[in-house]
């Protein structure tokens, strides 16, 4: 059980080791920031060459400090850090912020130094932020600690921020100040030698001063733990995250359909989504969303009323709303009637409500009150373009008055210049967020609505599955390994694979192997025609590419001929490929073709994929992915959210497919992947989702195994390695 | 030939009719703005009740003004406008800006007043901006005219702006000022009674003071003319446009596949794209793009080098670039070698080039010079996060020095707060645009690259087509009308349709009609089996929905049975539907299924659609649309840009489809639609695009005719009616 983060955020005393009198040096800037707030406890500069620094009495070393020290901020060069940390440990310091660079991020000796740093911190049961970071900050009145070297101090507030980039941290603090977004705590996590983003989320979960949690991430230390924590915390407080490094993922080799369709960044999307984390693409959007969540209730639905005094911006807001998945409902008749009672004839009382330029402050107040009381409305965006006469300040006051008693989010958009800054301040102190453009408001609202929908649904559960025979599965894998699976790049032989899938209750169309034309005909006869015949060759991954698949074989004669033709086609396409006969299976017709697969991300573990089958799916990429294990909610969303879903639910009078059976299949595949960390890739393609009560059945399957221990430690890999933070 | 716009933009004298001493009245604000610049000619306030206004001698009426008046700005109430305009005409005034509201936008009497206003203006050969607008503005040193009532004056520059919303115009002028985007001329077009957006584009085409044209549009007066003008002008000067009113389009009734797939907003996208107009979603993006185009050369390719002193923002920029279709190339070995020579070992010399926090101004200058000289690079984004020591000003100077001699666009992104405003000013005066976030820079660059690609390709031509028999086509349409096409909602009978399509060289699988089971079997025999049989019923649009399509009928016996089954299926599905026998055609197999169609937009005229066929296309919406007539370039882009294109070009070893034949078909369909304004909808679905030299063939066709005069005036309709501008 690691020690609490309390002394990190709420120390009673702070030592600055490496404090400097030069205010443009980092050690000078940190000290100055601590003094300027000022920090509400004692600050001890530590520097062997000074009796006082910036007028504060200094000490030659940490052990010379007379009182207790809760937190030490270390800014000495990397070579001196370990010695300083050890001295802190001996002194009984409880928490450290190591700003100094020269650790893991420089590789080699730095990596070793960081390991030693971590060991020292653990030995003394201290907690550590950094190394290689910008510092930490807590705006609470009782603390007022700015232990960073940032030249900017954000306003106090209820939004916490963890940044994996110190450089971006600077920009972030500045942006927070310019938007007037109040910050509770800010942490630049640096190399995360000890305190991780996960630790911070858990701290803020219980922190009464924090309502909204913001994250800038470049990598995940432990994605599984992140999911676990985030799922829980996001139910209490919104978590908004920017995760950079989308491009790094492109390099992954993709040998299976599923692998080609699932990039690492899609895994991040899936993970955030399953955990209820709001993902934004940019820091700008992160703050826009935070501004809304920090001040307004979470929207419970997508229906937006727009109130404006100018047509153009109203239309642009409507476009933006619909473009982001929000809707513009019809207003209740009584709302329209009440609007008509005081608006001029030229005004539009349909949504968007355009009060035209003559609207005054009273119109805004009355109309806003009517709109948020309308049962068809989940949120209101109020747009104001200052005409010549009506002042922005009066309208701001009217919006505040009109918003009173609203249980729904209200957003404002003040366009133009007339004294906006002052009026925005008054709006903000009344907790009405204001945006410069209607699109910005719509985008922030859309993200919050998504979160609201996530919140409104109960957390999913991983369903219990019957008829899973792990012993049989283990035997099938052992058999595959015994047959020399490594020489085949890990691809499991057909028979062992059929056995493994059967052990998990996954139906595959039973195939039998024919070594020659006579056997092919005989097997066809015993299975019953029509049959399908498929090439067997360890050298061929996509059988249809080499003419290796023949459908609708109806007689023994056709079966014998097809056997010959497949062999000839293989010879023509890949003369050197081995030919291991053909598999023969009963032809099943009808139903909708789908693909169900697994790919294993080095950091995230198994991802389950679902999409509609056929070659077109790979081009059109209409697929859904989730991180395993799937909850019932995950599986249902996957199926419902592909664009081709209508094909399953009974398109144009076709019978509906057996969706419960499909969901069951997804859960079985998820379980198979979760139980077997050495399962690297699985394609069930196509899966026929049949109508009525018929269970769905895979017509083909491919599964690749890794070395038995390959997936044991899910820490390395492209995502974990994404960009060491630099400062 | 309408008179020139010259006196509108460069009057030697201006009368303000309705000038007021109250500066918060519109007539007072316009006068004050003219005086404040000050306007470089004479200003005559006209007001019957004052001898001077704002210290300027006033005149009781326009004819009392002693000198010539080039431009009159009219701000009297609507009821007095016509009289004032007539007096202006008599006086010899050449141009008018009518700011007053109370015209078309209020309907009824206002509409009539606007017609009278237009007639008066035409009679006196004057030009008119408005009515119901914010005014016009020209920043040229020799003119300096602010004839608006906006409280904001943008800086002078080379960007012209036409806004269809006066309200947004205010916000736009303010935004231009805050971004320091220099404006040459600004026009709030109001109701466009005379001067239209098209007129302005043509004026700016020849205006030496204007390099970039910005448009905010809510409707198109004459889309065909817009396309014609924009195609020409965009080759000389970039046109960037925001078109609002996306949502209005949803309401269109869609009875055909093509109609359902093509919304009006898609028509706008197609139109802009075909004309080389850069479309942005928001005013913010409009200005970001303008900032770049006004200061830097047009990028000729998508390969971006990123230069940064901080990893995080570099990663975010890389993500944003790739997310917007730009790429990050490998740098040339000599560039990497030269970078290594002066950057520290911890720096990354791969793209993004991360010089780490120790980078100083000299590093920026050297590195930037190397990057824009790299042959693999088409554009450079320079990111600077101010660390404690290096000042933003030095880096800004270094970027200016390093950019010297570059023929490629260079964008900068200064994050954080250290003195950014001053350093940005110096960058801007050196024509290096700066953005607050890397994503913003990437997005602006991506739009400019798209434009650059458009510019780099020659303008397309509409190809000549052989074998078109218009007389036969007219006869087929006449035959359809004679058969009472109106009673069938305009759907053409099969035989006449086959004839019409044949007259345009469009191959349809020839079908023959069977009225009973015996005929069905006999026709099958004469065509040769296998055949396809399809229901004929005027009451059924989608035959497969009612079990009305039977494939692969192989014998006479099967043909007779299929006939009975289709009749029974129709009876079960729609008991009241009429049954008119079946059509029988030869079954063609192989090839790729596609859809080719036409839908007619009330404003834009015929839109040609292309996509891959099958029910899935309607769900996955992988289609391309263009406004007819198609050029060769349009048709090629349509085919190449569907996501499913690889299916046509030879997917996974399949033979390539006959794409030239498909292009020919698209041109024939385009020609058919252009020649016949009464063609409302056409579906060729499926079209089989066959391999090798086989021409493609439509297996089914549906065509709806309107009344003979229905499409004669393409002015009314959802797009033209979108939102009257209000002020």
Image (tube, coloured by chain):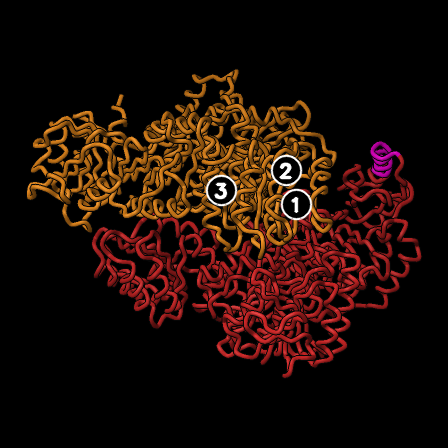
Chain colours: A red, B orange
- Give the CA distance from mark 2 to mark 1: 9 Å
Counting from the top left corner in percent of width and height, residue A39 is at: 53, 75
Magenta segment main secondary structure: helix
Disc 1 element: strand
Q: Chain of mark 1?
A: B
Residue that numbered label 1 is attached to:
B353
In the picture shown, does residue B526 fall above or below A201?
above
Query: Which is more N-terminal, label 1 or label 3?
Result: 1
Q: How many marks?
A: 3
Which image quadrant: the N terminus of chain B?
top left
Q: Closer to the camera: disc 3 or disc 1?
A: 3
Q: Nearer the viewer, residue A204 or A586?
A: A204
Q: Which residue is mark 2?
A: B371
Q: Residue at x 22, y 54 (%)?
A: A389
Residue A413 is inside the magenta segment: no
Whether residue B579 appears in this view of the structure is no
Label ID, residue B427: 3
Q: Is residue B166 left or right of residue A293?
A: left
Residue A183 vs residue A126, the one in the foreground: A126
Task: State the SS at label 2.
Answer: helix
| Residue extent of the magenta highlight | A562-575
Q: Earlier in the sequence, mark 2 or mark 1?
A: 1
The spot of residue A67 in percent (x, y) is: 63, 83
Q: Residue at x 22, y 58 (%)?
A: A343
User: Rounded to the nearest whole Å, what is the CA distance between mark 3 and mark 2?
Assistant: 18 Å
Q: Earlier in the sequence, mark 3 or mark 2?
A: 2
Q: Residues within 10 Å of mark 2 (few under 14, many from 20)?
A: many
Q: Residue at x 38, y 63 (%)?
A: A376
Q: Residues within 10 Å of mark 1 (few under 14, many from 20)?
A: many
* A403 or A476, nearer to the observer: A403
Are the residues tagged 2 and 1 within 8 Å (C-beta)? yes
């Amino acid at each position: 059980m690691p020690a609490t983060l309390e002394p990190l955020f709420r120390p009673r005393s702070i030592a600055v080791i490496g404090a400097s009198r030069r205010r443009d040096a980092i050690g000078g800037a940190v000290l100055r920031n601590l003094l300027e707030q000022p920090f509400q406890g004692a600050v001890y500069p530590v520097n062997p060459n000074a009796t006082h620094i910036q007028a504060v009495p200094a000490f030659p070393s940490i052990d010379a400090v007379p009182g207790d020290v809760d937190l030490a901020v270390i800014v000495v060069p990397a070579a001196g850090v370990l010695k300083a940390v050890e001295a802190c440990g001996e002194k009984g310091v409880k928490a450290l912020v190591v700003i100094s660079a020269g650790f893991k991020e420089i590789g080699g000796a730095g990596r070793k130094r960081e390991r030693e740093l971590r060991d020292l911190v653990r030995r003394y049961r201290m907690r550590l932020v950094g190394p290689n970071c910008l510092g930490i900050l807590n705006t609470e009145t009782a603390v007022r600690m700015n232990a960073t070297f940032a030249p900017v101090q954000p306003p106090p507030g209820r939004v916490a921020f963890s940044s994996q980039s110190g450089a971006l941290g600077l920009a972030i603090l500045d942006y927070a100040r310019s938007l007037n977004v109040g910050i509770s705590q800010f942490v630049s996590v640096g190399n995360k030698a000890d305190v991780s983003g996960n630790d911070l989320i858990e701290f803020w979960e219980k922190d009464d001063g924090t309502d909204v949690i913001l994250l800038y991430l470049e990598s995940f230390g432990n994605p599984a733990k992140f999911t676990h924590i985030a799922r829980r915390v996001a139910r209490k407080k919104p978590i908004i995250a920017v995760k950079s490094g989308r491009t790094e993922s492109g390099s992954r080799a993709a040998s299976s359909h599923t692998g080609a369709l699932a990039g690492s960044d899609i895994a991040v999307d899936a993970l955030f989504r399953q955990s209820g984390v709001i993902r934004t693409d940019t820091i700008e959007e992160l703050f826009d969303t935070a501004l809304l969540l920090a001040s307004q209730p979470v929207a419970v639905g997508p229906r937006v009323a727009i109130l404006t005094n100018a047509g153009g911006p109203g239309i642009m807001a409507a476009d933006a709303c619909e473009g982001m998945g929000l809707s513009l409902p019809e207003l209740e008749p009584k709302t329209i009637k009440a609007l008509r009672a005081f608006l001029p004839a030229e005004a539009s009382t349909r949504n968007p409500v355009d009060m035209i330029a003559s609207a005054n402050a009273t119109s805004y107040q009355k109309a806003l009150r009517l709109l948020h009381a309308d049962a068809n409305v989940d949120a209101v965006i109020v747009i104001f373009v200052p005409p010549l006469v009506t002042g922005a300040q009066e309208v701001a006051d009217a919006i505040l008055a009109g918003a009173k008693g609203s249980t729904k989010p209200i957003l404002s958009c003040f366009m133009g210049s007339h004294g906006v800054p002052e009026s925005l301040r008054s709006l903000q102190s009344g907790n009405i967020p204001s945006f410069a453009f209607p699109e910005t408001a719509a985008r922030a609202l859309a993200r919050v609505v998504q979160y609201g929908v996530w919140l409104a649904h109960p957390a999913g559960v991983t369903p219990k599955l019957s008829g899973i025979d792990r012993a049989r599965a283990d035997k099938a894998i052992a058999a595959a390994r015994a047959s020399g699976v490594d020489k085949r790049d890990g691809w499991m032989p057909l028979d062992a694979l059929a056995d493994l899938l059967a052990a998990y209750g996954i139906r595959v169309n039973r195939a039998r192997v024919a070594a020659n034309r006579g056997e092919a005909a005989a097997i066809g006869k015993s299975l019953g025609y029509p049959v399908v015949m498929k090439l067997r060759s360890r050298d061929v991954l996509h059988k249809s590419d080499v003419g290796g698949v023949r459908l609708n074989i109806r007689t023994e004669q056709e079966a014998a001929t097809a056997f010959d033709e497949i062999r000839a086609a293989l010879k023509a396409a890949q003369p050197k490929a081995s030919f291991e006969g053909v598999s023969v299976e009963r032809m099943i017709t009808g139903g909708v073709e789908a693909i169900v697969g697994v790919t294993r991300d080095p950091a995230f573990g198994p991802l389950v994929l679902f999409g509609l089958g056929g070659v077109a799916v790979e081009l059109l990429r209409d697929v859904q992915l989730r991180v395993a294990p799937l909850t019932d909610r995950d599986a249902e969303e996957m199926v419902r959210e592909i664009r081709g879903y209508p094909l399953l639910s009974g398109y144009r009078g076709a019978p509906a497919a057996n969706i419960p059976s499909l969901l069951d299949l997804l859960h079985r595949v998820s379980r198979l992947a979760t139980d077997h960390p050495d399962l690297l890739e699985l394609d069930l393609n196509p899966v026929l989702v049949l109508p009525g009560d018929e269970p769905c059945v895979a017509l083909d399957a491919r599964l690749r195994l890794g070395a038995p221990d390959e997936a044991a430690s899910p820490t390395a890999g492209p995502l974990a390695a994404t960009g060491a933070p630099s400062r």
